[in-house]
Amino acid sequence: MSGPCSYDRPRRIRRGAALTLVFASVLATGAATGTWSDSAEGAAGARGPGPTAAGLAPTDRTADRTDVERAASQAFEDGKSGSKAADEVVSRSGDRWSAIYTPGEFEDFQRQLDGRYIGVGLWLRQAAGGRIVVSRVQPDSPAARAGIAVGDRLRAVDGRASQGRPVTEVVGRLRGDAKGPHGPSAAAGTPVELDLQRGDRRWRTTLYRTRLRTQNVTTARPAGADGPTRIKITAFAKGTGEEVRRAVRGASPHGGLLLDLRGNTGGLVTEAVASAAAFLDGGLVATYDVRGSQRALYAEPPGNPRIPLVVLVDGGTMSAGELLAGALQDRGRAVVVGSPTFGKGSVQMPRELPDGSVAEVTVGHYRTPSGRAVDGRGITPDLIVGDGAEKRARTVLSGLGTGA
């Protein structure tokens, strides 16, 4: 259980709240997030997808890992709950990126790194006033078939109001947290009632959970031979880097590439580094520190460093998504278009506690190749555009010339 982890959470997941969200990338009704690993695929990385909680800036406060471990060990020796003691230390620190997980919760996260989960196909974020809104709907999922759309407000789940509650808690209700009202029966086929609102319309619908697999990479190829290829990455789960490599290999060298990272909730940093390698011919992708020790992440060649590339970002681009955008921008490999990103650049490391639970505590931060800090600042696009960002990106791409 060594290696740093980077999770994208708008706030720390508390014990008893919804647990089965993935670490950094998607606070979805069961998407996968990512952790850092010093050895995996030759690079350290963040583990997974997280919520697109735009407007919730990370805090600089961090929990002290030694204090967390000491409290857990002492409690365990006293016959008390080590994880509860550790959770109290993390809670007092105010570090919303650190968290304590039961062994079962951590195993669930590990499974989700494969991109598989049981849920209804919704991703959520917290909007102004504590409202919970839909940020993404998985195609051909129960939510999609019920007509739920991005921007819809989720007012309640199984009769329990969502406003003001942590996104993680609401997601846990959707998934059927084992500690919640569904108990252990919350598996594929179990129902969940949603209270929704779109404009002035308010309605209720019952969905049935099913086994789903996240589609984190989608590729749209041009109708003609020379048009741009659009690659959309929503999160970095296992295999994302290879999917991106295949998409780049299949792109027309003349039309260029449009890499869409808008709403990318993060994920495995190893996969973000592997994705960066598809556009680079090796070299530095990012650096990060762990208690003052500097480390680096490198892209493994060969990639395609010549095909024209424009990257789209927005306030929902987080963590591993920011790492990728920042690397391509600093290396002079791409023009970045859109709005400033979320600003999640902290590093968490997992540690098993005496009672088998797992503590994830912030230990450092990562930087872009030029040394820019991401945490609390985000990535500023080369061209800031709000509405019509993709149209502007295509215009920029058409002026970049052709690859060879």
Image (cartoon, rainbow, N blue to C red):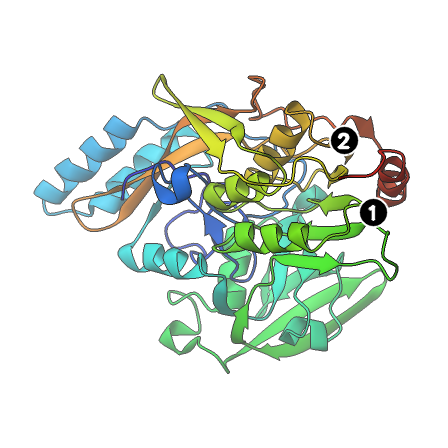
The amino acid sitting under disc 1 is: Gly
Mark in front: 1 vs 2:
1
**Above or below, comparing residue 191 to residue 19 in the picture:** below
Asked which quadrant contains residue 39, the reply is top left
**Above or below, comparing residue 392 to residue 239 in the picture:** above
Number of the label disc, if any, that sits on residue 341: none
Q: Quadrant of the C terminus?
A: top right
Q: Quadrant of the N terminus?
A: top left
Q: Residue at the location (67% across, 35% down)?
A: 55
Number of the label disc, if any, that sits on residue 335: 2
Front residue of this view, candidates 142 and 168 = 142
Q: What is the crowding at mark 1: few (fewer than 14 residues within 10 Å), some, or many (at least 20)?
A: many
Number of the label disc, if any, that sits on residue 255: 1
The amino acid sitting under disc 2 is: Val
Q: Position of residue 352 (x, y in %)?
A: 23, 44
Q: Residue at the location (60% across, 29% down)?
A: 327
Q: Residue at the location (58% across, 39% down)?
A: 276
